[in-house]
């Protein structure tokens, strides 16, 4: 009997070991595939054209800000996080030099410090982000920034806006000065009126005169509309390009006003592969989508295009739409075209 039990245990042990080996092999292959695929998206290490830091200087002063095609970054401060959370590999300073003017900001308060977070992961110091913004506006007074404070943790909002005021200066924050709705206020703002300033939006009701309302279209009159259907961003990437993005544009046309943010990033359903893995397949498709806006006539409906892992090249695809919109200064069209080509755009 004892020998029979030992044989049974031995067989069970072999089966368990075999299963564990198969699991280890599958995991090893999966990790290798993720690593290889993710390596296709590399940080933009090329020095961006100097004019890219002040590209808004080439746009007419009287253009309404929600008519400008603006490059934006998703989860803007996640550089340096692990692969499951990092959606950007350029710092705020580097993104600004690469033409990004819309930033998705999420702040956590932890260990007596304010940091950028993505899910459970903490990253860059918020104070450094503010320093990058201040220094950039000091050097580039022709530009304006949209700071979209999407999320907060641990009541960080109590001091986040005070820190913004102290670092950047209250005189460089766009103040709402009329009794109209937030969307009406933004729709009447011209580029000339906001140069050198930050326009601040947030979904939180906070007692600051400059904070404008933002959201997913759950109510009317918001300054900024940013649609996001989580399941579609986690679904088939081809359907996302062909169906989801056009549906966002159509939805804004039907019910939105103010600033429109087109969210062009995918979201990891498995939560292990990470944004860089997803972007490796999505990158060229998204680039083609932006280019085709020029061909299908939808360029005039575009305001902010938000993406992962921004670069001079991806920024140039969005900025180039302003030429088709007809809002580039006449005397600057040659400079504008050169800037776009120098940023990596293959042809105009």
Image (tube, rainbow, N blue to C red):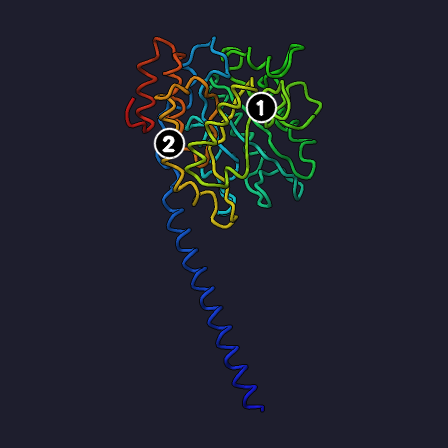
Q: Between marks 1 and 2, how big is the CA–CA gap? A: 33 Å
The residue indicated by pointer 2 is 287
Labels 1 and 2 touching (C-beta < 8 A): no
Residues 315 and 169: in front is 315
Spot occupied by residue 291 in the image (x, y as percentages of width and height): 36, 26
Quarter that holds the N terminus: bottom right
The residue indicated by pointer 1 is 168
Q: Classify mark 1: helix, strand or loop.
A: helix
Depth check, mark 1 against mark 2: the one in front is 2
Q: Does residue 32 appear left or right of residue 11 in this picture?
A: left
Spot occupied by residue 151 in the image (x, y as percentages of width and height): 62, 34
Quarter that holds the C terminus: top left
Quadrant assignment, res 26: bottom left
Residues 200 and 239: in front is 239
Spot occupied by residue 138 in the image (x, y as percentages of width and height): 50, 21
Spot occupied by residue 338 in the image (x, y as percentages of width and height): 30, 20
Residues 68 and 93: in front is 68
Instruction: Judge the density around disc 2: few (<14), some (14-19), many (≥20) Cα neighbours within 10 Å.
Output: some
Instruction: Judge the density around disc 1: few (<14), some (14-19), many (≥20) Cα neighbours within 10 Å.
Output: many
Specify which label sits upstream in the sequence, 1 or 2.
1
Q: Does residue 290 appear left or right of residue 200 in this picture?
A: left
Q: Classify mark 2: helix, strand or loop.
A: helix
């Amino acid at each position: 009997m004892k020998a029979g039990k030992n044989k049974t245990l031995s067989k069970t042990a072999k089966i368990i070991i075999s299963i564990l080996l198969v699991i280890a092999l599958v995991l090893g292959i999966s990790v290798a595939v993720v690593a290889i695929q993710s390596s296709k998206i590399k940080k933009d290490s090329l020095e961006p054209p100097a004019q890219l830091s002040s590209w808004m200087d080439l746009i007419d002063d009287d253009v309404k800000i929600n008519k400008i095609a603006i490059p934006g970054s998703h989860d803007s401060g996640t550089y340096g996080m692990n692969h499951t959370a990092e959606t950007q590999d350029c710092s705020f300073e580097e993104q600004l030099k690469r033409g990004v003017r819309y930033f998705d900001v999420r702040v956590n308060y932890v260990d007596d410090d304010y940091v950028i977070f993505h899910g459970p992961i903490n990253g860059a110091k918020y104070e450094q982000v503010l320093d990058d913004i201040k220094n950039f506006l000091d050097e580039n007074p022709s530009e304006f920034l949209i700071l979209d404070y999407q999320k907060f943790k641990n009541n960080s909002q109590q001091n986040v806006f005070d820190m913004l005021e102290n670092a950047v200066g209250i005189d460089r924050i766009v103040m709402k000065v009329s009794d109209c709705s937030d969307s009406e206020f933004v729709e009447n703002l011209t580029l000339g009126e906001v140069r050198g300033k930050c326009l601040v939006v947030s979904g939180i009701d906070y007692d600051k005169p400059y904070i404008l309302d933002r959201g997913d279209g759950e109510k009317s009159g918001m300054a900024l509309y940013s649609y996001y259907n989580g399941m579609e961003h986690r679904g088939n990437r081809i359907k996302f390009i062909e169906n989801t993005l056009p549906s966002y544009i159509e939805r804004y046309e039907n019910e939105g006003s103010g600033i429109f943010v087109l969210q062009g990033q995918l979201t990891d359903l498995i939560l292990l592969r990470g944004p860089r893995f997803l972007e490796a397949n999505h990158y060229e498709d998204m680039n083609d989508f932006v280019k085709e806006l020029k061909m299908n006539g939808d360029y005039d409906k575009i305001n902010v295009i938000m993406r992962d892992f921004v670069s001079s090249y991806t920024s140039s695809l969005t900025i180039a739409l302003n030429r088709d919109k007809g809002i580039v200064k006449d005397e600057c069209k040659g400079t504008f075209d050169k800037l776009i080509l120098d940023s990596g755009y293959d042809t105009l």
